[in-house]
Amino acid sequence: MKFTKSAPLWGEITVPGDKSISHRAVMLGSLAEGTTEVTNFLKGADCISTIRAFQAMGIDIEEKEDTLLIHGKGLHGLQAPKETLDMGNSGTTTRLLSGILAGQTFETTLTGDDSLKKRPMNRIITPLSQMGAQIESLPGNGCLPLRITGSSLKGIHYETPMKSAQVKSAVLLAGLYADGPTSVTESALTRNHTELMLRYFGAEITTEGTTSTIQPEPHLIGQKVEVPGDISSAAYFIAAALLVPDSQVLIRNVGVNHSRDGILRAVHAMGGDIRLRNRRKEHAEPVADILVKSGPLKAAVIGGDLIPALIDEIPVLAVLACFAEGTTVIKDAQELKVKESNRIDTVVSNLKAMGAHVEATDDGMIIEGGHPLHGALIHSHLDHRIAMSFAIAGLAAEGETEIKHAECVNISYPGFYEDLKSLQMEEE
Ligand code: S3P
């Protein structure tokens, strides 16, 4: 896929449903009694991996027009799958599902694609084992395939060593099956969709500061879930509208949960013209429309507690930083190394190919803005967020940018390139 300097972006857009919330809707809908109706579900490859896994465990999931109907069978209604469950590229499916599977009465094996097979699973094996789970990494290296033998679980208090919503969620979901309360304390708040949705479905779960505690064996009841637009997908249009001169874009219906809105806070700190309109609440989650206009940006320091609120947006923030005045420092973001690619390496090497002045650090990168980017051959490394971030860089760079394996955007945003094109004004 090729990109060149863009005409102004102008108009309105609605981005697909939030990936994290879509996964959780399928999981809790399956464990609830009665039918859960999900609208604006993200039909990306990752969420389809979650659907397939629950179907393989006997859950009837049907698509009716634009609604996903999940006919839940209750907390103890899952059946042993006949085959190994394929998680595809999805870390969220793997880690959250492991928490659920730990408390079942059957054995399951989970596998995934080449990228997922390299990602660390000890981060969930450790706390789940403390709860009494039996989980074995078959290659013995803490990675997939995992064999999970359901066991009786005990409630624990766990302090997460890394800022990870996936780890927190795995423990809380296992807590549904424990013999007493389970609590998780994190050093900074990570996305809290699991907690919000568990409460919405009827679980007894409380949060004080950064500690959440769940009581076991709740009676979960099927609900209507309207999935808000994914702020992580909106981030690409936010960045494009900021960078391409004379642009103005309204992104409708975006989830703006505070644990996810770091991109908005970072763009404010960089002096970007971005406003929220029509703030409202859809079921458990806050939603707003986002209006963005192009304009100059200044450098910022992005680190600390802000990182978990924008962890998936760092690749596109790094692109923005190349066009900002001054030196941007991204720090405290070691977690980037264990995403769908090592995003410190893949962002820095691709930015360097485009002529950026950027250096990798152990926990992020340092970007000296104000040096124009030129087109280059970009390796997506089959990482959807790298492909989309560099498509945006290509709209603001001189010359032609070509993205290898650009189709990997289907993981989280099928239709991304078409949506981007729909905003570009026709050249005179
Ligand atoms: C996710 C949590 C984040 C994020 C991922 C989705 C989730 O991962 O990067 O894309 O849905 O819980 P970590 O919690 O491991 O940082």
Image (cartoon, grey):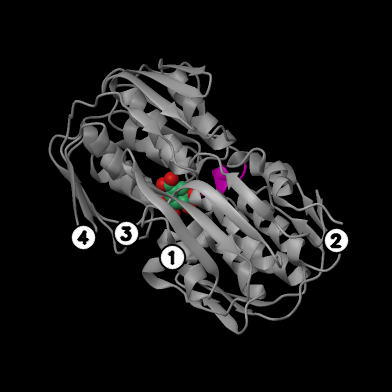
Spatial distance from mark 4 to mark 3, Cα to Cα? 8 Å
* Mark in the foreground, 1 or 2: 2
Q: Is residue 205 visible?
A: yes
Q: Secondary structure at mark 2?
A: loop
Spatial distance from mark 1 to mark 4, Cα to Cα? 17 Å
Q: Residues within 10 Å of mark 1 (few under 14, many from 20)?
A: many
Pick out the residue farthest to the left: 180
Q: Residues within 10 Å of mark 2 (few under 14, many from 20)?
A: some
* Image quarter in which the C terminus is found: bottom right
Amino acid type, callout 2: Glu
The disc, 4 or 3, on the residue closer to the chain's N-terminal end is 3
Q: Is residue 315 visible?
A: no
Q: Secondary structure at mark 1?
A: helix
Q: Position of residue 365 (x, y in %)?
A: 57, 74
Amino acid type, callout 4: Gly
Q: Position of residue 391 (x, y in %)?
A: 72, 55
The disc, 1 or 4, on the residue closer to the chain's N-terminal end is 4
Mark carried by residue 400: 2
Q: Residues within 10 Å of mark 4 (few under 14, many from 20)?
A: few
- Look at 54% across and 29% down and name the residue there: 48
- Look at 33% across and 21% down and name the residue there: 106
Is label 2's Cβ within 8 Å of ligand 1? no
Question: In the rendered image, which residue does mark 3 sit on?
Answer: 189
The disc, 3 or 2, on the residue closer to the chain's N-terminal end is 3
Cβ–Cβ below 8 Å for labels 1 and 3?
no
Amino acid type, callout 1: Ile
The disc, 4 or 2, on the residue closer to the chain's N-terminal end is 4
Mark carried by residue 3: none
Q: Position of residue 373 (x, y in %)?
A: 76, 72
Mark carried by residue 307: 1
The residues colored magenta run 114-121
